[in-house]
Image (cartoon, rainbow, N blue to C red):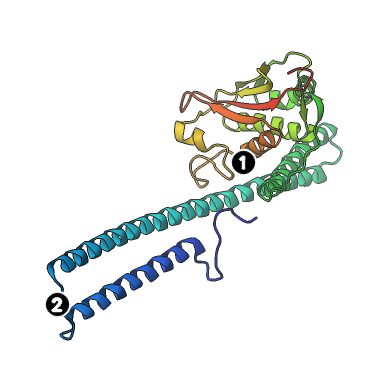
Amino acid sequence: MKTPAVENSRDGVSRGPLLLFLAILVIALAQVTWWNVLLVRDSDPNQAPLDAPARRRRIIMVAAEGSAFALAMTSGAWLIFRSLRHEEQLRRAEANFLAAVTHELKSPLASLRLHAESLELRPDDADRVKTYSSRMLADVERLNRSVENLLAAGRAQAGLLVFHPVDLDLSKEILQYIEYNLPMFAERGFEIAAEIPPDIRAPVDPQAFQSVLENLIDNAIKYSEPPSEISLKLYKEGPRAALAVGDHGVGLDPPEAARVFERFYRAGDERVRTTKGTGLGLYLVSEIARAHGGGVAVESAGKGFGATFRVFFPLAAQQS
């Protein structure tokens, strides 16, 4: 997947800083050449010496050009530094992303293989078959969600996300999702506290809203230690429907909260992080909400105090 904002030449050198450096180099050479021309002209014995006003004008001109040149050099150096720093951040994010994807794909595959081998050894144990089959289905679902997020993130970056909004009953969708997944939540040690009033509707693509739900709840689970409670609250806020998903997990400090919806962004470093994920879930939530005319927000009192993620969609016309 192509990473945005970094365009590489064939030898791997970033074109932006390289072109800027070449432009500054050309300006420097032109400026030095011009000053040499002036110096040679003023040193020519065949030329009449400059009078006082002309010499003063020459000094003012050179000082102004020198100041402008110094300003251009300083600005250029800062822009090059900023570009290289941004490129380094993207490379680090890319490396973290690759490490995360490797983990996300290898872990369920290893689990599937282990359970399949166990079933092959004991095919007549009905209880074991039921338990392992359930776990294998969960691993397959995890793999499918990871692949779907990767594909959706690629389409979002290319501007190719296509939605088919319908007059969707958000209340019904959320309650059905909770009911279907309640055994899984309980098995993992999480309790769902839901405040879902009936018949809150919005023009939203059903599959897109399903993705929003899955990613927000998955994010809450990943960053919380069981046993714990995850809260879901659906309500009207002016002309918008708002869904708030809160947890009692690790929380966010202000710099992390400002970047948490960026593509690939995850706090810390993949080599020391223990939570699963690719850094795409919240990015997709943000892209889906904005594509539907809504938005996202996050609130956290800081590290160790959990976080609440909110997603907004315009209410259906008859409800606004």
Q: Position of residue 267 (x, y in %)?
A: 50, 39
Per the image, label 1 sits on a secondary structure element best described as loop
Q: Position of residue 202 (x, y in %)?
A: 76, 25
> Which quadrant of the view contains residue 242?
top right
> Which quadrant of the view contains residue 57?
bottom left
| Residue type pointed to by label 1 | Gly
**Vertical side of 112 occupied by 295: above or below:** above
Residue 74 left/right relative to 63: right
Asked if residue 4 shows in the view, the reply is yes
Q: Quadrant of the N terminus?
A: bottom right
Residue 23 left/right relative to 284: left
Q: Extreme bottom residue here? A: 46
Query: In terms of depth relative to the viewer, which is nearer, 9 or 56?
Result: 56
Q: Position of residue 313 (x, y in %)?
A: 69, 27
| Residue type pointed to by label 2 | Pro
Residue at the disc numbered 2: 49
Query: In terms of depth relative to the viewer, which is nearer, 225 or 205?
Result: 205
Query: In terms of depth relative to the viewer, which is nearer, 32 or 107?
Result: 32
Residue at the disc numbered 1: 277
- Name the residue at 76% across, 39% down: 141
Query: In terms of depth relative to the viewer, which is nearer, 1 or 177?
Result: 1
